[in-house]
Amino acid sequence: MARHSREEAAASRDRVLRIASRSIRARGIGGTAIPAVMRDAGLTHGSFYAHFDSKDALVSEACAHAFLRSAAVQEATAAGSRKGEALAAIVRRYLTEAHRDEPETGCPAPALMTEMVRQPAAVRRAYTKGIEDLLARFERLSPGRARELSPALLAGISGAIALSRAVDDPALSARILRDTLAFWTRVLARKEGKR
Amino acid sequence: MARHSREEAAASRDRVLRIASRSIRARGIGGTAIPAVMRDAGLTHGSFYAHFDSKDALVSEACAHAFLRSAAVQEATAAGSRKGEALAAIVRRYLTEAHRDEPETGCPAPALMTEMVRQPAAVRRAYTKGIEDLLARFERLSPGRARELSPALLAGISGAIALSRAVDDPALSARILRDTLAFWTRVLARKEGKR
DNA sequence: ACCGTTATATGACGCTCATCAGATAAACCG
DNA sequence: CGGTTTATCTGATGAGCGTCATATAACGGT
């Protein structure tokens, strides 16, 4: 009911941000309501504006946060794979049923793809920054000179995750993941072979 | 204010459906409001339920309608291209800035991708049917035996359109379209070469 | 000519949302 | 210790939503 200490307040803010970051991936931006986020954080809705200027400000930060977490996972995957196969390892981990079924901890790129067009400038900026970083990582890890391949790869795997979630037939959903993984694995192996 | 004739009523229903079909692609499903659709159709909100059982029923029909219109465009493109190059022609037409900038008349696959997970059964069914038909068309038009390539292709081009719309940097948006088109054109040409 | 049907319109219901105003009380700071 | 700051709560505002109840009046069939 009353005020918290600096650290407690910072922890509250962090909790709200983390919950929002998961919520926008699981329920979308439009489906993320401030009252629900605050309730999940163990607070009442009114205190929201003590921490953030607006919903847009929260969503911008939450979006950036989601990309950061996702980036950490990818870097860890890259670090745990053999030289030149890092990108293939990332793709292999990306196109799984686990990733499909857990959007709230997954990559924000496919989760927010279609909603972004209609978001205010600050939110789109955060998303674009995340996409730029993703592409830069792909280019850095590309075997051979496959720079122009990165956008097609990102579009391909994020599109596959989004589609596999959208479709209501489990067999079709699995096929989308499986065939897309097989395709890109072959493409990346060929690039690797070529040096 | 009063009743219309059978034909006029059917025309009203059709108008509502067509407007909804455009609206879900441009504004999303959550962003499509019945009052707005009815206003655009020149009616008041209350008469909506004389034509449709619920918003979900409207969205289901609108989704199916959007896939049908999009299919007609693709079939026309295929018919106007040389044998074996139909798929490449479809992709070339798909990955354009015009398609990116006109979602309301474009393919519903990228427009609704991320919202579908959270839709009721009937709506997801309509979307899945549309995706199945799309994949079947791609397989039918595939040069050589590129059947397992279709899901990766659909994910790749719909993901590219969605990403190119999401991003706020025009240069990046254009690059996503250009590089993805170049990549798939090369892939399809190789398959064609192989017979 | 009539009457049941129905495509519209008006208006209301209950809900949820983003945002803000005011009060409270604990934390911070001198 | 005293005064100020501020994290939180309660509650309100106004808007928009999907849905439905009711009324109207023209249509369609008899």
Image (cartoon, coloured by chain):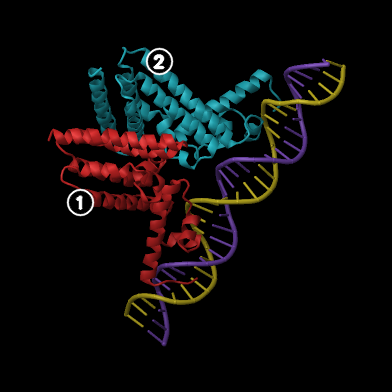
Chain colours: A red, B cyan, C yellow, D purple
Residue holding disc 1: A79
The kind of residue on which mark 1 rests is Ala
In this picture, is B18 found above or below D12?
above
Image coordinates for residue A187, horizontal then vertical, percent: 23, 33
Q: Which of A81 and A22 is in front in this view?
A: A81
Quadrant housing the C terminus of chain B: top left
The kind of residue on which mark 2 rests is Ala
Q: What element carries label 1?
A: helix
Say left or right for B58 vs B69.
Answer: right
Mark 1 surroundings: few (<14), some (14-19) or many (≥20) residues within 10 A? few
Say left or right for B34 vs B192.
Answer: right
Q: Is circle 1 on the same chain as circle 2?
A: no
Disc count in the image? 2
Residue A51: quadrant of the picture: bottom left
Q: Nearer the viewer, residue B191 or A39?
A: B191
Residue holding disc 2: B76
Query: Disc 1 sits on a residue from what chain?
Result: A
- Name the residue: 45% across, 47% down: A27
Please say if the residues under marks 1 and 2 sit with CB atoms less than 8 Å apart.
no
- Name the residue: 62% across, 31% down: B52
Image coordinates for residue B82, horizontal then vertical, percent: 31, 12
In this picture, is B6 found above or below A135?
above
| Tag in front: 1 or 2 | 1
